[in-house]
Every structure is written in structure tokens, then in C-alpha cells.
Image: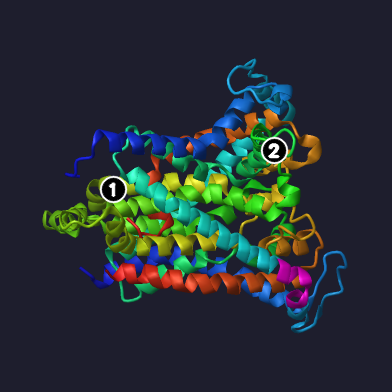
Amino acid sequence: MATRQTQFLARSLLTPAVGLLFIWMIVPLALTLYFSTLHYSLLDPGSEAFIGLENFRYFLTDPAFLASLQNTLVLVGSVLALTILLGIPLALLLDQPVVGRNFVRLMVIAPFFVMPTVSALVWKNLLMHPVSGLFAWLAKLVGLTPVDWFNDVPLFSVILIVAWQWLPFATLILLTALQSLDEEQKEAAEMDGASAVSTFIYITLPHLARPITVVILIETIFLLTVFAEIYVTTGGGPGLSTTNIAFLIYSQALIQFDVGSASAGGLVAVVLANIVAFFLVRIVGRNLEA
Amino acid sequence: MARMATTKQVAVSTAAAWLFGFLIFFPILWMVLASFKTELEAFAIPPSFLFFHWTTENYATVQERSDYLHHALNSIIIAGGSTLIALLIAVPAAWSMAFSPTKRTKDILLWMLSTKMMPPVGVLVPIYLIFKTFGLLDSRIGLVFILCLGNLPIVIWMLFTYFKEIPRDILEAARMDGATIGRELVYVLTPMAIPGLASTLLLNLILAWNEAFWTLNLSTSNAAPLTTFIASYSSPEGLFWAKLSAASTLAIAPILVLGWFSQKQLVRGLTFGAVK
């Protein structure tokens, strides 16, 4: 099968993809690395100078960095917790015999296909507006004071929107995993007199361990870089209360035009993402051998 | 599946599933309803759910005032173009790795996956400056290029997992019958690869259509796809809820339909085959 000719053919088919991805990865990253060592502001062209690690010192000791790191961690952690804690019962429910299951599944999956700018603006205005939003009306209906979402709990509001977008993803993956669970195993457990709870704890949950891990890792990759939802709702504010790392770097680069510092920040973001990626790649790699 | 559920159990889980399904879907439904209201009614408290004066004028206004179709066309060109180019590059690569794997195939695949893990903000500055230098800011070609590269790893991965499933025996049988590589490609492999190609195409169209980091940062008006266009409604002076809803409904409708058709591929594509 593997004659020299086919080997050569295979290699030449693979080369364009590998080459392009290599350039895509290495050129911008090298430039980011280079810029991060420069004093480089677009507002002050011609003043570029090598300043070593000064940008890193500036970026990492900037109070905005710690605030945005904290916001990033809270955002990622909360969305993960919400999507998984709600996703598991939802997936279990959809795995039951339900009349019209396909239609229900369509409704549950829908938010995932809505572009981020649309979800964010619809939530911000139609639902969360402190006076005319639906939530305000509901709150008054039951005699509560309406919440001024984006002023009183800005980060939580962003979390809600992002969790709504990612809940379908978690649910869908967990449901797919549940459907591959061996039905006979559950039956045998029931025959032996296991309760629904212990069947869940000892059979279903261990089966879900891997898909849950995959959901956590993949969501983390995307959640670390949440941008559009913040861009159209709060612009990072009030103050820094909804600025995450991605938004901070964006504002340093394209609002303050501080190329050097934004590049240093970009490298910090790359390092953070790589910590997660390391684990994800290992899990996927293990799967590739099986 | 042999377990028998009682009627009562089915009734309870059906009611619960419909309730939660409806709650999750509700924001989208609410937006679609608002798109058929007048601006006053969209803003009104108490809100009207179904008994309002239905109108389609928002849809007409959105097109007239802001040239909706121009942005829709941008979305089609950017999402479609980047997906097609990615497929052109990815098909040979995935093909080669699936059918003549070497010792390094696994490493190459994982390396490709890791390029997808790179956060876009990490390279925002150089990409922005490169675009600025070459006059690519707010150009469709620039966005096609960036989104194509951004999605290339997912495209290659998905195609690889599909090609991997094509049975080898069929190839060997065709060769025994004296088929040349060309005929083998056209008559044996292509028909078997089409479902995988279609799913990959679909999922990547969706991802590219909804991409909202590069599109927001690299386009403003001429090349602005729907993501950027909708974002322009976030400015305080642009707060027209009914029109925002009409524009949003149009922007998500086609992709919602495509998305519903590609649920299964979604899991596979986004988990890199780690969950099937």
C-alpha cells in the first residue's frame, strides 16, 4: 500500500495545510513577542524603542490586569458551573421518553446558533432593561423591585447571557453521551434493586465523567476569550467590572493604541489558554489511539 | 430501550421537558414577536404577548435605512468563502492523513488542534497592524482569509474523523479490479465521503457566520457582516427595539435552520471526535 509514490503524494497533499497553519501560528505570535519588548504606541509613531520586559511589568502590575484576571476567572467558572449543573438534569430529562422530544431538543439547542451580538443585545434590551424589560415587568408582577441588571450586577448579567449561549452545547454533548450508555447495564442495576439515585451515582455519572471533562475544557477555551457579549453590552464597565482579559487587551490595543503593552497582554492570554489546551490535547490524543 | 415507562412518568417528563425547552427558547421567541410590533409596543409595559397590532414595517425599514441586504451579502461571502477555501485546503490534507498515515500523523493532528487553542486576542495586535499596512481593514477578502485560517483546524479534524470511517477493504477491492487512482477517487471514495463533507461544510458555515471577534475588530462598514451590523444597534442613539429585533431575526433565521439540521455534526465537530 505504502509505495514510495503514494507516500510522496500523501506528503504533498498535506503540505499546504501544514504550511498555512504554521505561518498562521508562528508569524503573528512572533510579531506579538517582538512588539511586547518595544515601547510602541500608534499615537506616537516613530518613537519605537526596545524596552525589554518593561511592558510585561507594566501589564502585570496594572490594577486593571488583576481586576480583569479575576473577572475572567469568575466568568469562566460561573458559566462552567451553570452550564454543567443545569446541563446534566436537562440531558437526563431529554433522555427520558418524552412526547415530541425532537421538537423540545430543537428549542433547547437554538441559543447556540444565535450570533453573540444578537443574544447580547436582545438580553440587554428586551429582557434586562430596568424599566421596559420583561424581567422588570415580571419582578413588579410579583411585587419585587426590578433589578437594574447592567448597573447593579454587571458581571452577573454577562454571565447569564453567556451561560444561556453555552447551556445548549453542554446539554447536547451530555445527551449524546447518555444515549451511548449501555441500556442493559442500567437494567441490570435496576433488576438488582438499585434505586434511581444509586443508578445515577454509580453508573450514569461515571459514564458522564469524560464528556463532562470535554465540555469543561472546550468551553474554557472559548470562554477565556468572550468578547462580543461584553463589547455590545457594557464596554467593559461600569469601571472595570466587566472587563475580562480579552477585552482589556482589545482596549489597550485599539482604544489606547498601546501596541507594546497590548502585545505583552496577548502573550499572557496565550499562556493562560495553553494551560487549558495542554489538558484538552492530551485527552483528545488518548482518544485518537483507542 | 426495553424498559417500559408508565404513562404517568411519560406525562411528567414530557411536561418538564416542554417547560424547560420553552424557557430556554423564550428569548428568541420574544425577539421574533418584538420584530412584528411597533416601536411603542415593543417598549410597552405591560408587554403584549400575542394581541398586538402585527406589522412587518420594521423589516422594510431595516432594509431601507441601513441596507440590510448589503451586510447579509457580506456575511454570505465571508462565511461561504472562508468555508469553501478551508475545504479546498483541508480535503487533501485530511485525505492524506486518513489514508496514508505515518508515524507523525497523530502529532500533526494534535498540533493542528493546538493552533485552534490560541486565543485570538493573543494575535490581535499584529493581525490588526498587518491588515492596516496592506489596506485589508474593512475588506471582505481579509476577513475571508482570517476566518478560513481560524477554522481550518476544525475542518481538517472533522474531515479526518469522517474519512477514517470509510472502510479500507472497499479501496482494496477496487484496486484488485484494476481501478486507477483517478477512477478510485471519483467512483468509490467521493460518494462515500459526501455526507462527511456536507456536515463539515454546514458546521463551518455556522461557525463563520457567527464569528464575532475578528469581524467586530476588522470591519466597520463596507465589509461589515451581520455580526458587526447588529452590534451597531448597541449605541444609545440606535436603540430601536423592534428594528433591532427585525434585523436580528433575519440575521439568525438562516443559520438556525442550518443549525437544526446539523446537531449531530456539531457534537462531533466541536469535540474533535472526543464525544460521539
Q: In this view, does B142 lie to the left or right of B20?
A: right
Q: Which amino acid does label 1 sit on?
A: Thr
The boundaries of the magenta stretch are A59-67
Can you identify the residue that label 2 sits on? A125
| Residue B97: image location, x then y, percent | 33, 65
Q: Which amino acid does label 2 sit on?
A: Asn
Dot 2: few (<14), some (14–19), or many (≥20) neighbours within 10 Å?
many
Q: Is residue B39 left or right of residue A172?
A: right
Q: Which of label 2 and label 1 is nearer to you?
A: 2
Q: Distance between the residues labelled 2 and 1?
A: 48 Å
Q: Residue at horizontal 70%, vertical 71%?
A: A265
Can you identify the residue that label 1 sits on? B190
| Residue B113: image location, x then y, percent | 45, 66
Secondary structure of the residue carrying tag 2 is: helix
| Residue B193: image location, x then y, percent | 30, 49
Q: Residue at horizontal 59%, vertical 31%?
A: B30
